[in-house]
Image (tube, rainbow, N blue to C red):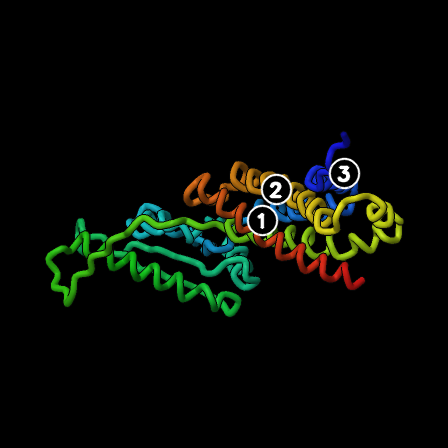
Amino acid sequence: MSKSYSQFKAALAIAKASLLAMLRSPTSVVFSLLFPIIFIVVFGTMVDTTQVNIKVGLSPNADTNSLLYKSLSRVKMIHLVPYTSQATLQEDLVRGRLTAILDIRPDSKIPFVPHYQVGLLTSGASTVKAPLVETIIHDLMSQIDKRLFKNNYSAATLTTKKMTGRMYQSIDFILPGQLGFSLLMAGVFGSTFLFFNLRQSLVLKRFFATPIRRSYLILGEMLSRLFFQVIGFIIMISLGYFFFDFTLVNGILTFAEMLSFSLFGLIVFMGIGFIISGFL
């Protein structure tokens, strides 16, 4: 008694053969997997531009023991650069290598009460960041005044509270974009010329000589691409998480959600690719 022909087993056999063909194809591996990984590595190693970095040159005769200097050195966005030559200092300011030149001179006339003359020199090459430096210095001077002269009258009192929130990095936006790029390449461009190439190489004609239905033929090709993209998805997420601190907010749950949305998007893209391939 002859066994019935299993359409699903035939689809799995096609999926296995198609997957092996994709893994051996340099074009599929490069555009769907290697390019996104290269972009993730390149952009992941770049300095995060969300943090403002301001270089301020320190005058050779500036007082580095003052309260203002110690407070300013603790500001993360301000990088104080000491100079020994005034000419080199002014040249770097004019060329835009520095945002400003800071000079702090003590001039206290009352014993045990500190007072300083603070000079800030800017140039036309630093018109964007210079007002920010001036604002930071004014704020630090105000904080020092409040600590030293607590009994001074004030029109208002400000109380600031800080809540813990999510700290996002540039990789948290780069990696999903590269995942989308990989899905687009595999779904649309990888499927568009699929049946056209199978027809040109007479493979499609041989498929039609077998009992397999056309729907299961498409199912087999879809399964191979889904499995291939799952491998690429796991590699890219693992690379971003373990090497570049990619944020998985809820851990494995976020990973599963991203995987499900990626598979849904891939099915949609493959549908578009198969429609175009049918017209071709």
* Separation of marks 2 and 3 at Cα, in angstroms: 17 Å
Q: Between residue 98 and residue 128, name the one nearer to us.
A: 128
Residue under numbered circle 3:
17
x then y, percent, for residue 223: 67, 44
Q: Which quadrant of the figure contains the N terminus?
A: top right
Q: Earlier in the sequence, mark 2 or mark 3?
A: 3
Q: Between residue 143 and residue 49, name the one nearer to us.
A: 49
Which residue appears at 39% of the width and 61% of the height? 133
x then y, percent, for residue 179: 60, 50
Which residue appears at 57% of the width and 52% of the height? 264
Q: Which quadrant of the figure contains the C terminus?
A: bottom right
Which residue appears at 16% of the width and 61% of the height? 157
Q: Between residue 97 and residue 108, name the one nearer to us.
A: 97
Whether pointer 1 and pointer 2 mark residues with C-beta atoms closer than 8 Å, the reply is yes
Q: Earlier in the sequence, mark 1 or mark 3?
A: 3
Residue under numbered circle 2:
230
Position of 42 with respect to 151 (left or right) is right
Residue under numbered circle 1:
263
Q: Give amino acid for label 2.
A: Val
* Separation of marks 1 and 2 at Cα, in angstroms: 8 Å
Position of 76 with respect to 91 (left or right) is left
Q: Give amino acid for label 1.
A: Leu
Which is closer to the viewer, label 1 or label 3?
A: 3
x then y, percent, for residue 137: 33, 59
Q: Give amino acid for label 3.
A: Ala
Disc number for residue 132: none
| Mark 1 surroundings within 10 Å by alpha-carbon count, few (fewer than 14), some (14 through 19), many (20 or more) | some
| Mark 3 surroundings within 10 Å by alpha-carbon count, few (fewer than 14), some (14 through 19), many (20 or more) | some
Residue 82 drawn above or below residue 133 = above
